[in-house]
Amino acid sequence: MITVHHLNNSRSQRILWLLEELGVPYELKFYQRDPQSNLAPAELKAINPLGKSPVIQDGPHTLIESGAIIDYLIRRHGDGRLQPDPASATYDEYVQWLHFAEGSAMLPLMLNLYVGRLGDAGAPLQPRIKSELANYLGYLDNALSQVDYLLGDELSGADIQMSFIGEIARKQGLLGPYPHLSAWVERFQARPAYKAAVKKGGAYSYE
C-alpha cells in the first residue's frame, strides 16, 4: 500500500490527484501547518529531514520530490496511462514539462510572493519579477492555445505536475492576460478525480 504524507495547503495535493486519476489505493497521513508560522510540523521531519511534503512510501521506496514521485507512480502503477510512449518524441516533451514546473516556472511565482511581502523594500525587484512572470506565463498560455492539455487532448502527468503553477498564478491574480492558461486550470479542476482528491486532502488554498 502506498502511503502519502500530506501537508495541508501544499503541493502534495498533486500526488493525491494523480493517485485518484490512476485509481490506485493509498493511505493518507495528514500533517497540519502551524497556524502562526505556516510551516510544517516537526513530526514531518521524521519522514523527510527537510520537513517538506509531498512524501510517499511504497514498500522500501521513499520519495520526496513532486516530479520524481509523479514519474515513479506513473511508471510503477500507471499501466501505461498518463504518459506518452517512452519511445516517442512526445515523451521527451512530457519529461521537459515535469522538470519545467519546479526548475523554471515556480521561481518567479515564489519571488513574487516573498518580495511582495517586503513592501517598498522589494520595489526595485518588481520590474524584473513581472517581466519573468509574463515570460513564463505567456509561454504556458501559448502552449495551451490549441489543446486542452499540455500534450494534446488527454490529461497526462505533465498537467498534474504543472497544475500548481496555474493555481498559484491564479491565487496571485495573474491569469487575466492568459485565457488559455485560465481555461486549462478550470478544466482540470472540474475533473472528478481532482475533486475527489481535494475532498480527501482537505482545504487547499495554494499557499
Image: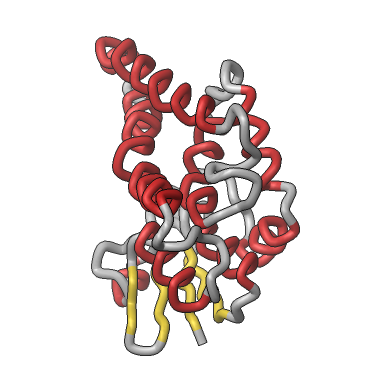
Query: Front-most of 174 and 103?
Result: 103
Q: Residue at x 24, y 69 (%)?
A: 49
Q: How is the image coloured?
A: secondary structure
Q: Residue at x 49, y 66 (%)?
A: 6
Q: Residue at x 41, y 46 (%)?
A: 93
Location of residue 166 with respect to 87 vertically, above or below: above
Percent coordinates x, y for residue 88 in the rendering: 43, 56
Percent coordinates x, y for residue 152 in the rendering: 59, 43
Residue 36 makes an appearance in the image: yes
Residue 207 makes an appearance in the image: no
Q: Judge from the rendering whether residue 72 lies leftward or rightward of residue 181; answer left or right.
A: left
Q: Judge from the rendering whether residue 95 lies leftward or rightward of residue 152; answer left or right.
A: left
Query: Front-most of 149 and 19?
Result: 149
Residue 148 sits in which quadrant? Answer: top right
Q: Residue at x 40, y 70 (%)?
A: 72
Number of dots carrying numbers: 0
Query: Front-most of 176 and 31?
Result: 176
Query: Front-most of 164 and 7?
Result: 164
Q: Judge from the rendering whether residue 71 lies leftward or rightward of residue 178; answer left or right.
A: left
Percent coordinates x, y for residue 57 in the rendering: 40, 80
Location of residue 183 with respect to 160 vertically, above or below: above
Location of residue 101 with respect to 31 vertically, above or below: above
Residue 200 sits in which quadrant? Answer: bottom right
Percent coordinates x, y for residue 40 in the rendering: 39, 59
Location of residue 165 with respect to 38 vertically, above or below: above
Q: Judge from the rendering whether residue 149 lies leftward or rightward of residue 134; answer left or right.
A: right
